[in-house]
Amino acid sequence: MRFFRLVAAVAGKDLKVELRSREILYTMGLFAAVIVVVFSFAFVKDQTALVEAVPGVAWAAVVFAGTIGLGRAFDREREGDTMRALLLAPAPRLAVFAGKTVAVTVLVVAVEAVVLPLCLLFFNLDLGTAIFDLALVLVLGAIGFATVGTVFAAMLLRTQSRDVLLPVVLYPILVPMIMAGTKATAAILAADGGDAWFWIKFLAAYDAAFAVAALWTFEALVIE
Amino acid sequence: MKRILVPGLAALAAAGLAVTLYLIFYWAPLERTLNFNQKIFYWHVPNWFMLFSMVFLCGGASIGYLVKRDARWDDVAHAAGQLAVLFGAIGLITGSIWGKAAWGHWWKWELRLTTSLILWLTMLGYALVRRFAGAGSERLAAGLAVFGVVNVPLVYFAVKLADSLGQASAHPKTQVVAKLTAEMKTTFQLSVVTFMLLGAALLLVRVGAIRDERRLRELRERGLDAGILDS
């Protein structure tokens, strides 16, 4: 129980700092919105945007904007030189890691809350109740992204040229997740429930596999 | 022993390359459906074997480094990571040429192509981290290698599942090797051995160079700490 209280404390701290300035939320949200707009320009035919492009556009926007947020979430610790304090706190490192992951997940979900309505708007989609399936897919994607991303962002904290290295090392690892996410989104848009459910299960398995790998390696990898 | 090992391996690999080239073009028969363009197979496939060997060596040595915290493991992982990029690049280029000749496309988003490309990109990221992340990036690189290896089966199954829901794979199956004629099989096995020798020679050279670089760096730091050297 104590572990979960510590996780909540770390996540709460990050989110409270963020809510005071809302810097990451606003910049990430606007960045994601701009990506959706740019892509929907790029995929226009006869004055309507191509529905086939939606899965790719939505996931590219989430992943790109998520990377910005990930970098900033840890920059804040570095600028305040508080990472050491956080690691020295009488809490297991796993709790610190899990708390950071929860905070990043919340930020990514907030970005998805911008991306999804914009996609519906610009691509003229009417999903009906399937929108809840899509929301589930997006949340599972956010959890996977935050889990893997937090490990890499924490490892890159003290290295040179981390801003460019983060996406370079992160995206290949995220490929199965992006693939499952786009496939699930495409299946939901095509009203193919069976396929969608299959990819939702795959996403859940991906999240579980990398949560285990991240918990197992985080302690050994973070340098301080 | 060490002084003759690397030149010996390199000489054997060079001889092997010459012999396999002769065997490929003058001894091994033409393949029935693919004809002449099947010849690239004898060099293409061993390169992928070497890529996967180097990746698993890199991942294994990285785990060793994380567990033991001994920099010698890290040297091996570093060298294997660089060679994985090299063999992967050769594999991708030869594969594209073969794909253009056999399928009419330079590239297809097919099971093994996609998996290999993602793996190669991961190793490229690994090489970039080693080159540019600066001091203290050893553990980051080791973590990246471990994640990269864990990722391989996930990418493979994701693409396989996506393919099974879509269209079938056009890539030659692994059972192909068992169906080769005797001459083809001998030629193929000799090329595999040749590329293994080449890989071993390159690996030993790279591990040695990286270890010397690290020792020099450590000595320099000790000299600076002791005040013997000026910065």
Image (tube, coloured by chain):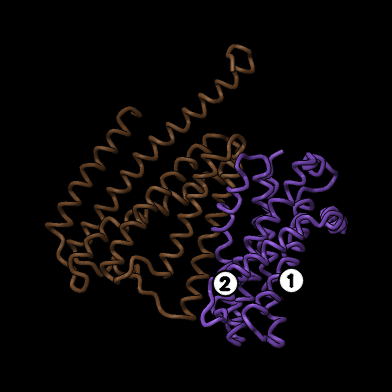
Chain colours: A purple, B brown
Residue position for label 2: A41
Which sits in the foreground, B52 or B137? B137
The reply to whether dot 2 and dot 1 touch (C-beta < 8 Å) is no
Q: Residue at x 55, y 69 (%)?
A: A179
Res A10 visible: no
Which quarter shows the N terminus of chain A?
Answer: bottom right
Residue type at the position of mark 1: Ala
Residue under mark 2: which chain is it in?
A
Q: Is residue B21 left or right of residue B142?
A: left
* Residue B35 x %, y %: 18, 69
In the image, residue B58 sits, relative to residue B155, either above or below, namely above
In the image, residue B116 sits, relative to residue B80, either above or below, namely below
Q: Residue at the far top: name it.
A: B228
Residue position for label 1: A113
Q: Earlier in the sequence, mark 2 or mark 1?
A: 2
Q: Residue at x 48, y 50 (%)?
A: B123
Which quarter shows the C terminus of chain A?
Answer: top right
Q: Is residue B120 left or right of residue A222?
A: left
Residue type at the position of mark 2: Phe
Q: Please tell me in which quadrant of the rendered image residue B66 appears.
A: top right
* Residue B69 x %, y %: 61, 37
Q: Residue at x 57, y 35 (%)?
A: B70
Mark 2 surroundings: few (<14), some (14-19) or many (≥20) residues within 10 A: some
